[in-house]
Image: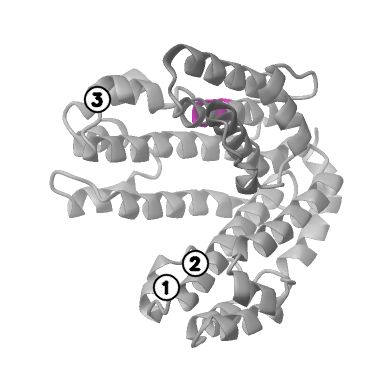
Amino acid sequence: MQDTDYKGVNTLLRVYETKLLTRENYEQLLKANNLKEALEVLKSTDYHFDENNVLDTKEYDDFLMNHLGNIYQELYEVTPDSEVIQFFTLRYSYHNLKVLLKQRFTGTDLEHLMIPIGKYPLSTLKNLVQTQQSMQLNEILVEGVQEAIQDYEIYGRIEAADVFMDTYYYKHLRAIAERLDNPTITKIIDAMIDLDNLSTVVRSLNRKKSRSFLHTVLSSSGTIPKSDIIDAAAGGAIAVLNDLYMDKSYSSHLHQIVNESKDAINPMKLDKLIEQIVHELMEEGLYQAFGPMPVMAYMFAKEKEITNIRLLLVGKDNQIAENILRERMRPIYGS
């Protein structure tokens, strides 16, 4: 597929980008005195919802996910290669599979936790978990479900749903990146997997988890061998950073957290730093006139917008101070 094939969709993206929340919108949301005032600000933007219903139920995700789902559906219809969109929607498919697997393992009705976003219909995912077979779904996804069910049937571990879906999600993303064969996308997925492994190691070490646990939860789809990460982890999280990550293009960001830490790394600070690194990689797409990167950059911006709105609405409902909300916000992409 040629980069010029995206000319039409990239023109349409310029229209979509004008509908992103602006810095002025965010300032108004931050200055709102309560949830009602914040919702009134949001109603003046591209988001549509029943204000009274939201005030009563506090179900923000219903209208946020509906809004996001509609945008993804529009992008699926106009983007030359659906796998570009799937780069972002895939995590919802794997989230839904986690829910369906746990529902199968426990016999508990968990369908209210499912999110109707993604290339694959929920009915098709349900059929996969029920039958362990599918001619419609990607073979990586099918294999992941089969492995999770087999593990549960042997060991009875409900957490198999999370472990296997997380592992196969990154395996699936890697396969998509290889098929798209775009150097910027490859660089992004390399960083995403390697940094997620770093975050997992930090959390695991803070919880005194074993070497065998790390072997189970770390992804093998990154550029840093899983065995190297596990070996370095014996010396602590700082050793993992110093031994394996300081030659990466984004290492200047990681120096900051090493300098602030003694023996342990704050996982929340690390995760915010990781988001900043991915944000900067995505920004490369803003300067590419053709190809898939402008679509990728827009979807990343939209996902972060949803995250910020959720944070602000919850914050205003709970009377969280403006300065704390401002500190927790993700990068803003609007004008």
Q: The N terminus lies in which quarter of the figure?
A: top right
Query: Looking at this rendering, what residue extends furthest in the front direction?
Result: 107
The residue that appears at 44% across and 29% down in the rendered structure is 159
Q: Is residue 297 visible?
A: yes
Residue 270 image position (x, y, % from top left): 33, 50
Residue type beneath disc 2: Leu
Q: The C terminus lies in which quarter of the figure?
A: bottom right
Q: Is residue 302 magenta?
A: no
Write down the residue under mark 1: 325
Write down the residue under mark 3: 210
For the record, the magenta segment spans 166-171
Residue 322 image position (x, y, % from top left): 41, 80
Write down the residue under mark 2: 311
Prevalent SS, magenta region: helix
Residue 200 position (above or below residue 13): above
Q: Secondary structure at mark 1?
A: helix
Q: Is residue 167 magenta?
A: yes
Front residue of this view, candidates 220 and 136: 136
Mark 1, residues whose alpha carbon is within 10 Å: few (<14), some, or many (≥20)? Answer: some
Side (left or right) of 60 relative to 118? left
Residue type beneath disc 3: Ser
Front residue of this view, candidates 47 and 182: 47
Sequence order check, earlier mark of 2 and 1: 2
Real-space CA distance between mark 3 and mark 2, rounded to the nearest whole angstrom: 34 Å
Side (left or right) of 281 relative to 69? left
Sequence order check, earlier mark of 1 and 3: 3
Tag 2 and tag 1, C-beta contact below 8 Å: yes
Q: Secondary structure at mark 2?
A: helix
The residue that appears at 45% across and 52% down in the rendered structure is 275
Front residue of this view, candidates 36 and 267: 36
Which mark lies nearer to you, 1 or 3? 3
Side (left or right) of 327 relative to 176? left
